[in-house]
Image: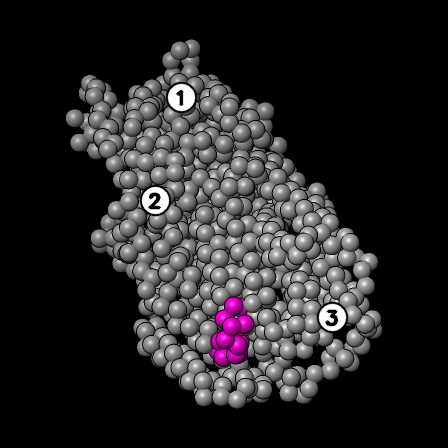
Amino acid sequence: MLLSAAMMGWPFLFFLSGVSSLIYQVIWVRQFGNLFGNTVFAASLVIAVFMSGLGVGSYVAGVWADRRYIVRPYAAVRAFGYSELAIGAMGFALLLGLGRLDDLPAGYTPNAAGWFVPSWTSHAAQYALTILLLGPVTALMGGTLTLLIRHLLQHDVTAAGWKIGALYGMNTAGAAIGCFLTDYAMIPHLGLRLTEALAVLLNLAVGSCVLFVTRHEARAPAPGPRRQPPRPREIAGESAGSTRVLVLVAVAIFLTGFAAMGLEILWFRHISALVGPFRAVYSLLTTVILLAMGAGAILSGAMATRAGHPLLLLIASEALFLASTAFGFWSADIREVLSEQSSAASAFVAGSGWAREQITLGLIGPPLLREAALPALFMGAAYPLATAAIAALPAAVGRRAGMVYLANTAGAVAGSIVAAFVLMPALGLQASVGVMFISVGVGMIVILAAWMSSPRPRGSVRRGIVVVVASITVAAMTGIVWLRLPADYIAMNSLPPLREHEQRLHVEEGVTETVMVTEVTGEGRRLITNSYAMSATSPAAHRYMRALAHLPLLSMEAPERVLVIGFGVGNTLHAASLYPSVRRLEIVDLSENVLQHAAFFTGTNGNVMASPRLAVYVNDGRHHLTLQPPDTYDLITLEPPPIAAAGVASLYSREFYQLVRSRLKAGGYITQWLPAYQVPAETTLAMVRAFIDVFPASVLLSGYRSELILMGTRGRTIEVDPIAVLTRMHATPALQADLEHNFLGTLTDVIGTFVASADTLARATTSTAAETDDHPVQEYAVQARLRATRIPESLFNVDSLAAWCPKCFQGDQVIPVLQDLPGYLTILDRLYHSAVFLEPNHPATQPLRLAGDHRVFATIERHPYLALLFSVRSRQ
């Protein structure tokens, strides 16, 4: 009875194994991203090694199990139990050791443009280390599938389709649940390390359960007459026709894996443009794909067992995969997505808690389901049907299942790399999808050849011809419709609509994003990547982006070396280049594509990319810092992409700031963009806490309105000398002109950026835990473009100015050159504590109306920045 119950429970145990596997994958991608840089290469590297290990392990375990199952019927399932224990042990070792790897050899090499990119030796070292760390554990993970297949099939392969489909489907469903819970529940509440520890416990529990259930069978002899283990020739002794079918199926499943994983990469690119580059979106998309694949595996396995003809079912599923994929891309339109989000905005702001979660899921769910669910259902059918088609020889079930799985994962690895690094930059999204369709079409031809080479029951030929003709017709019609689409149809439907008086200047698809440059009459140009406005040349953007460089450099005496992380359109970098003492400028950006568009913004960046003082690095900013020696920079400044986007948390964590501090010279400065309006108040406070934990000598400044700037120094105190600042403001005519053009032309404008002292920030965050690598809270604070945020009012205290600028005062009065400063800050203080400032997304917020005597309005009129902020209407 116990054994029977155990046999019924194998799919459930394999479900739990799938949960732990996806937890590991999600966490390892993050951890290796912090180690190698949050680049598309690093993510692709981890996934490639992960999947390669699965494939190799599956084949090796299958060969081993085929040679053991006759003599020891429970050898395979007990090996599954021991594998789970070993996976748990290795997972625990990685949990303890991976975070300690922070000093790896790496370097740069110049590319054709003279920019520095990670060298091939760096990539080789990263690849070798990833294989060393993840290869063994992922090989064990891959082996678990073929071990269970070998155990469940034993001598009877008549129900191969159903049993394989159930195993594969349950494991994939477990992976889906693991993915969803990891990003929606476990990491936000437990952190990465405890979440990984739960995966370890799952493996240990599954392994222990398997070994406990089969403990009495470990020494039991095989039923019936004792047989010798099958010889290698017996295992591989298929007929020539059977071998031909096996090879053809392996080739077909390679092509299917190539197209499936390639399209998954393209889905992620497309969906991120439609819905947003948020962690919740990526997690939900992966969950949808895996759940649909699991359902497809179970359904196809059942159909193969009931109806037979797995190869015919496979060719039909491939045709339906093509048609459903084409429909998903064709029907997606960002205008529809944005319209639905706009309609839901009021309800989202008015709601709270679970109500907002429902609205968010209701907005991001339909585009994901429409584009990926049905294709993934047919993707999931491929492996069970292919394995059922070649499982005719009982003695070789494990080896054959392993070979098919190896071919499938090898195709998936190749597809992901080719799609991301070759097809997208060279052909763009729409043509890349077309290449994947060709791969599926060739795979269908190979499957047809396999069916024609396999033995067919009498009377099945006519039915097979009908299925083949129908499948080819569906595939051909899909291809014809796809080719007749305008060449830019998919790209145009995923670009945000233009505003009034805005024109599109250029669109280009690259490795990591689609870049669009637009121009708005009377306002300037915008840089948009994956449908998000990343930078601009408007007056507001000019002021805060340039303030990131101007404010710290004006506070320093003769800075020489500056690092800017994130190019945008070049505002910050150009501002830093105006200081005559700066001898070396460095710009680090993940996207070579963005850097190549600098020429569209030379009116703003002064063609700074051609400066002989500039070194350009195409890399992750955090990884670049790990490659630099301590005490290198006078200033490190950064303005990452939207701070709630996936991966950006690594540039706001306490560990990142510790790295920055170690690379600053004594007395060096850091400035960090803090758009508090983009995330909830508690998330903003966690980010501030992380900063002041490492830089206690710090202040909060306002670059423009709510575009806040955290500024800290490695020095003991952060005090600014107003007279020295005034002198530096006039160092060169170019610098003076730039300050005036960007509303920083007077000493009052510069000192008036002050918002709060370090003491104010410390009090505001007393009860808040800091953002860390283990708890990247900002990535889970926002799940869609909708916002219902409130800027923490406790962060604002302009009355603490003396902590930053004690020399601005003579006794209780400001120095003469700053006579406008009290009134200037009083006006801004009204703004900082107003509802229109603190709740910018609330539809019921009333505009700020200033009340005061003529001196208030006179102060506004004397300072262009205040005039920009406050219209005539606001003075009523």
Between disc 1 and disc 2, the foreground one is 2
Question: The residue under label 1 is which amino acid type?
Answer: Asn
- Rendered-image quadrant of the C terminus: top left
Give the overall secondary structure of the magenta segment: helix
Question: The residue under label 3 is which amino acid type?
Answer: Asp
Q: Residue at x 67, y 46 (%)?
A: 205
Question: The residue under label 2 is which amino acid type?
Answer: Ile
Q: Residue at x 51, y 39 (%)?
A: 188
Specify few, some or many for label 1: CA neighbours under 10 Å numbering under 14, 14-19, or 20 or more. some
Between disc 2 and disc 3, the foreground one is 3
**What kind of element bears circle 2?**
helix
| Magenta segment includes 856 | no
Q: Which residue is mark 3?
A: 66
Mark drawn on residue 694: none
Residue 380 on image: x %, y %: 51, 65
Q: Name the one closer to the observer, 249 or 860.
A: 249
Lateral position of residue 712 relative to residue 742, left or right: right
Q: Which residue is mark 1?
A: 797
Q: Name the one closer to the observer, 600 or 413.
A: 413
Mark drawn on residue 359: 2
**What kind of element bears circle 1?**
loop
Lateral position of residue 827 relative to residue 607, left or right: left
Specify few, some or many for label 3: CA neighbours under 10 Å numbering under 14, 14-19, or 20 or more. many
Using the numbered discs, state the Cα–Cα distance from disc 2 to disc 3 in whole angstroms: 51 Å
**What kind of element bears circle 3?**
helix
Q: How is the image coloured?
A: one colour
| Magenta segment includes 304 | yes
Query: Magenta part of the protein: which range?
Result: 301-315
Using the numbered discs, state the Cα–Cα distance from disc 1 to disc 3 in whole angstroms: 73 Å
Residue 680 on image: x %, y %: 41, 35
